[in-house]
Image (tube, rainbow, N blue to C red):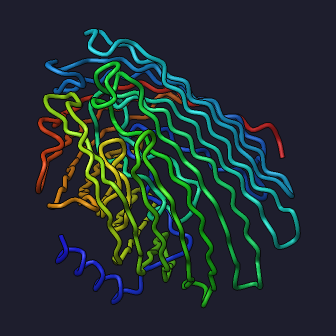
Amino acid sequence: MHKSFAGFLILLAVTGLASAQSTAPNAVSGEIAPVTLGSSGQMTNVIHTQFSAQGMYDSSSYIANGGGNWVTYLQSNFSFMQDRKRMRWSLEYDPGVVLDQSGQTGSMLNQNFGTDMTFKVARHTDIRLHDNFRIDSSILRNAPLDTVSEFGLLSRPDDSLLAPYSRRTYEQVGLQATQMLSARSEFTVSGNFDEVNFDEKSGTVGSPQQQLIDTRAADGEASYSYRLSRRHTIGLMYQHQDYWVQGVDSGGQSQGFFYTHSVTFAKGMTLSGFIGPQYTRNHNQIFVEIDNGSVVDRHFVQSQFGGWSVSGGSTLQVQRKRTGLALSAVRRVNDGDGLSGAGHYNDFNGRVTRQVFRKWTVDVNADYSNSQLLGTASPVSFAAVSGGASLHRSFRHGLSAQASYLRIHQLDLVGQPIFGNLDHNQISLSLNYEFSHGLGR
């Protein structure tokens, strides 16, 4: 993996990647895409609704000693966007019901509430407030969580893993201030706080030793960007993050300095990335052991770790009339999304979308990630490989249908086993209805 990352850094330097305004790739298939806010000459008040009925079969169980499982997911989305001279805001609520026909996990309610507000408090000063509250289950967790920062690759949590059956409550709150210093430069400061909790269904009820790991994190960022030309923007960024495990004495801090660079090419192509040193201190590592779809034990390692590493990432996005492409690569310090404490995290992700006929669209995506835990006496690392494809058909009056397949392979690389048997083959069919209505300018 070190050789692969070294090659990536060489590619980064040669092609001049990097950027203070990089964003994560588009959402994976099946996630409701956000509505584009109105611009000059368009509607500036938009109501958007979507309803979806999805049936999904998973070849592996989410509970101990269970078999394949079929669930039905009924989801709705309600959102409102408004754009004014000094304020731009959006409000979104996504309730959903999971119906479990086999009785393995029981029926449940998923909810997602989000709001994003930007205020122009002065001619060259913007304030942005973001909040996302989500209650979801690992059965349908196949899309990355939202992040407040535009520096998506650095701030995005590790959501590529699929843990045993778990109910997760997640909240992220962020505040960002941007000051334009000139026509070519700006300065941004931001602060984010997020908390992740798993309920007792994630393991054995009443046994803390058989539960997934609850975490909290708070980070602050300061960045400066300068537009060299119409196509090139460069910048510098500093980030400090504190993270800790709830209920036990485990956590740490990290801070890093990054050079950023973005390049905008003709015909809808952008290339961006960041690179820089990151220093991490971590005390008392913790991780879980999973066997046959259930958490069987927590491992707590008393330790002290401190050291430097190189963090970096890049994103390539291409948008053509019929084809969309998003590629990303990132290396950073991150937590294990309920499975472990902090570790060195690497992720490579790609997605291609192609409109093959007027009403038919094909989507193919793949992802590889691995993590090596910090502060263990001997190396402990694990990885996840996933790939999938979907076929989308549009009909009249906002109706559409989609069929998709996703394969997830999760494996232990070195040291204490974590995953056991957690491979999944998922097949889903869905029928969707979408409606947007402008309320005027």
What residue is drawn where x is 70% and y is 43%?
Answer: 90
Compare residues 394 and 303 and report the one nearer the observer: 303
The percent coordinates of residue 332 (x first, y second) are 37, 67
What residue is drawn where x is 72% and y is 51%?
Answer: 38
Q: Dividing the picture into quarters, in which one does residue 331 lie?
A: bottom left
The percent coordinates of residue 326 (x first, y second) are 38, 61
In the visual, does 189 lie left or right of 7?
Answer: right
In the visual, does 270 lie left or right of 378?
Answer: right
Regarding residue 269, the answer to whether it shows in the image is yes
From what the image shows, is residue 12 above or below residue 358?
below
What residue is drawn where x is 30% and y is 53%?
Answer: 285
Count the marks. 0
Q: Quadrant of the N terminus?
A: bottom left
Q: Dividing the picture into quarters, in which one does residue 291 lie?
A: top left
Compare residues 41 and 50 and report the one nearer the observer: 50
Compare residues 389 and 68 and report the one nearer the observer: 68
Regarding residue 347, the answer to whether it shows in the image is no
The percent coordinates of residue 103 (x first, y second) are 28, 9
In the visual, does 257 lie left or right of 92?
Answer: left
The percent coordinates of residue 40 (x first, y second) are 78, 59
What residue is drawn where x is 36% and y is 39%?
Answer: 213
From what the image shows, is residue 151 above or below residue 419?
below
From what the image shows, is residue 125 above or below residue 435?
below
